């Protein structure tokens, strides 16, 4: 997944790199991703000299950038967020929401920041689904090249109200983790999350591919953990994850 390919879309010199998204957004849509970032990336945020996070492609309204700032500041009170949008009208509409620590900029995958600053975090949610699969690796590489040392790129997809979300976390060395997050009451089985796989994975959900095997095993573990449903969906999910880990899947998180 981390192999590079020639860029499939180019922009004239001086113009932002990429294409405008549909702009769909909602308050609290990215809450699961935000909370995971604030927990998993907390050490890097605390170490950074002046941490900047980029909300890339925030959409028609700036809610996700505003919320990201609030959640990061629970970890690092001086964190800054820059919302970057390729549509200049969206940037203009967001500017009334500027405040200390929060700004908005016109740009794309080149991630323009003042004085060539390099962000500690780039969050790109629901941006790459409109691209071809063979374009993703080049976008990942371009974005990771903009990160500060130790920085993180988080790229993924969710539904319109943020109940189902899957994202990939990458460093300069390539993909590190894939996270599956959901309001558990909305799921009949874990593989329901397949429809929210990031672009790099969604077309790989076929027999013989690792993501398909993982979701198959997750469904089996979920079915075997059915007796735990009496204790709630969360306990059933935890038991299913324990079974996956015991079967050799490299799960990195546990209950919090």
Image (tube, helix red, strand yellow):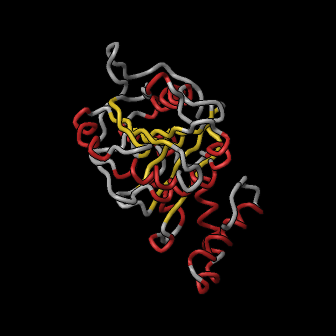
* Image position of 82 (left or right of 178): left
Q: Residue furthest top?
A: 13
Residue 21 in the image: state x and y as whole percent. Answer: 31, 39
The answer to whether residue 169 is above or below residue 6 is below
Q: Quadrant of the N terminus?
A: top right
Judged left or right of residue 125, residue 216 is right
State which quadrant residue 95 falls in: top left
Q: Residue at x 47, y 54 (%)?
A: 70
* Residue 224 vertical placement versus 20 (above, below): below
Of residues 32 and 131, the one drawn nearer to the viewer in this rendering: 32
Q: Which residue appears farthest toward the front when viewing the image?
A: 100
The quadrant the C terminus occupies is bottom right
Above-or-below relation of 92 to 70: above
Q: Is residue 30 left or right of residue 189?
A: left
Q: Position of residue 226 (x, y in %)?
A: 61, 79
Numbered-mark total: 0
Question: Image point 42% across, 38% down: which residue?
Answer: 82
Tell me if I can see residue 161 in this picture: yes
Front-most of residues 120 and 100: 100
Query: Percent from the top left, x then y, of residue 136?
Result: 48, 32
Q: Residue furthest bottom?
A: 230
* Displayed quadrant of residue 229: bottom right
Judge by depth and name the residue closer to the eye, 125 or 92: 92
Confirm whether residue 212 shows in the render. no
Tell me what residue is drawn at x 51 percent, y 71 percent. 184
> Measured from the top left, where is residue 28 in percent x and y?
39, 60
């Amino acid at each position: 997944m981390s192999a590079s390919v020639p860029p499939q879309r180019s922009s004239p010199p001086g113009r932002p790199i990429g294409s405008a998204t549909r702009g769909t957004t909602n308050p609290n849509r990215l809450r699961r991703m935000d909370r995971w970032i604030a927990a998993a990336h907390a050490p890097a945020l605390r170490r950074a000299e002046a941490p900047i996070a980029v909300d890339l492609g925030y959409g028609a309204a700036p809610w996700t950038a505003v919320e990201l700032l609030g959640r990061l500041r629970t970890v690092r009170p001086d964190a800054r967020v820059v919302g970057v949008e390729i549509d200049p009208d969206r940037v203009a509409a967001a500017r009334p929401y500027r405040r200390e620590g929060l700004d908005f900029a016109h740009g794309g995958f080149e991630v323009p920041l003042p004085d060539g600053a390099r962000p500690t975090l780039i969050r790109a949610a629901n941006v790459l689904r409109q691209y071809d699969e063979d374009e993703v690796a080049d976008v990942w590489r371009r974005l990771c090249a903009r990160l500060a040392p130790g920085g993180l790129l988080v790229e993924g997809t969710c539904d319109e109200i943020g109940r189902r979300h899957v994202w990939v976390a990458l460093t300069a060395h390539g993909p590190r983790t894939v996270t599956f997050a959901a309001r558990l009451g909305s799921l009949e089985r874990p593989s329901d999350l397949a429809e929210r796989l990031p672009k790099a994975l969604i077309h790989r959900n076929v027999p013989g591919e690792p993501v398909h095997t993982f979701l198959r095993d997750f469904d089996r573990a979920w079915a075997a953990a059915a007796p735990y449903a009496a204790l709630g969906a969360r306990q059933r999910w935890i038991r299913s994850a324990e079974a996956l880990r015991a079967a050799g899947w490299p799960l990195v998180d546990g209950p919090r």
